[in-house]
Image: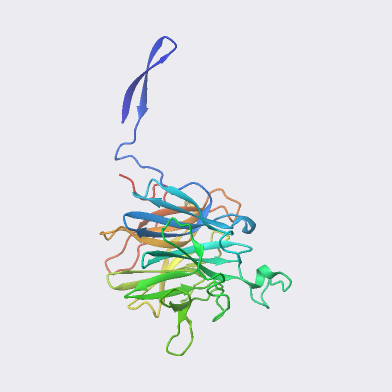
Amino acid sequence: MKTKILFFVGNVLLIGWTFAQTPTEKQHNNPIFDGWYADPEGIVFGDTYWVYPTFSDDYDKQLHFDAFSSKDLVHWEKHERILDTTKIKWLRQALWAPSIIEKDEKYYLFFGANDIQRPGRDGYDPNNDINHFGGIGVAVANSPSGPFEDLLGKPLISEFHNNAQPIDQFVFEDEGTYYFFYGGWSHCNLGRLNADFTGFLPWEDGNLFKEVTPEGYVEGPFMFKRNGIYYFMWSEGGWTNGSYKVAYAMADKPTGPYKRIGTILESKEGDIATGAGHHSVIRKPGTDEWIIVYHRRPIPNLDRDHRVTCMDKMEFNTDGTIKPIKMTFEGVGNP
């Protein structure tokens, strides 16, 4: 659609045109906001969509979180430094992969910090405190925009259980139980948070965590529920390259067991980006419309940390399985 405009240059009247987007034209909504951001968790609070990503940069610069909010999935407001090193005193190396949930009118933000390593693993340095102190932390605020304060003054999980590196946590509430999925290094654990989110309730065998690792799992667990089915999702491949991708399983209860069904998001020859993964899922309130929120690497891109946050539609087959997802520039939220 074009509109005639009149304007003067000196004493000369000129005629020009402006071009506005028509409902049939497509917008480029991906990436959904500017900047290098990864590991996004999308969620709805009230009438507002929120995205909490990792600030995707070198480890020594990855020391704060920004958040983004939107009413329409197109226009995003940036909330800067909702959490940083001034609030997390034990944070030394890196802060990443946030996960948030609301409980009793408070907002709890979980995160991985310091890239904790285990003795005997390549890269472990016994003389470097960064490598053997850290884990998963939790901060709390009265608003989804923060500011967040450290809840414990120490990690919520700082030890290795079932060989899972304590990173990449996700909290899933179901019928009053707060399930806590987490784990890197190809192991996924499941725990249950206590009432004030300061620790965990033991399972029947007395252990705080049970391993629920499905075939192909690497990191980045996520769960949602649709039509009584629990969908457990995770990332496979290597996060530093184009092999990164998203796979999933389906179960009739949140504790599984989970049998891998297949891959739904991955880069292929001719795609517009590579390394798609570490995702989350949003359901548009009051609908059966679903959105996958994920990061990917633009083409060309030679920097492992140059990742952007995107959204695309996620659709289902009649049997409840998830259709393969196509990466787009258009994204979601178009007229």
Q: Is residue 286 left or right of residue 114?
A: left
Question: From the viewer's perspective, is residue 27 above or below residue 166?
Answer: above
Q: In the picture, which quadrant includes the N terminus?
A: top left
> In the image, what residue occupies the spot 56% across and 55% down?
56
Q: Give the residue at the far bottom of this rendering.
A: 205
Q: Give the residue at the far top of this rendering.
A: 11
Res. 232 in view: no
Q: Give the residue at the far right of this rendering.
A: 127
> In the image, what residue occupies the spot 35% across and 62% down?
323
> In the image, what residue occupies the spot 40% across and 80% down?
257
**Along the viewing direction, whichever of 330 and 62 lies nearer the viewer:** 62
**Along the viewing direction, whichever of 110 and 318 lies nearer the viewer:** 110
Question: From the viewer's perspective, is residue 36 above or below residue 283?
Answer: above
Q: In the picture, which quadrant includes the C terminus?
A: top left
Q: How is the image coloured?
A: rainbow
* Image coordinates for residue 77, horizontal then vertical, percent: 42, 47
Instruction: Determine the image quadrant of residue 91.
Output: bottom right
Res. 171 in view: yes
* Image coordinates for residue 49, horizontal then vertical, percent: 37, 55
**Along the viewing direction, whichever of 319 and 281 lies nearer the viewer:** 281
Question: From the viewer's perspective, is residue 298 above or below residue 218?
Answer: above
Instruction: Determine the image quadrant of residue 280.
Output: bottom left
Instruction: Determine the image quadrant of residue 291.
Output: bottom left
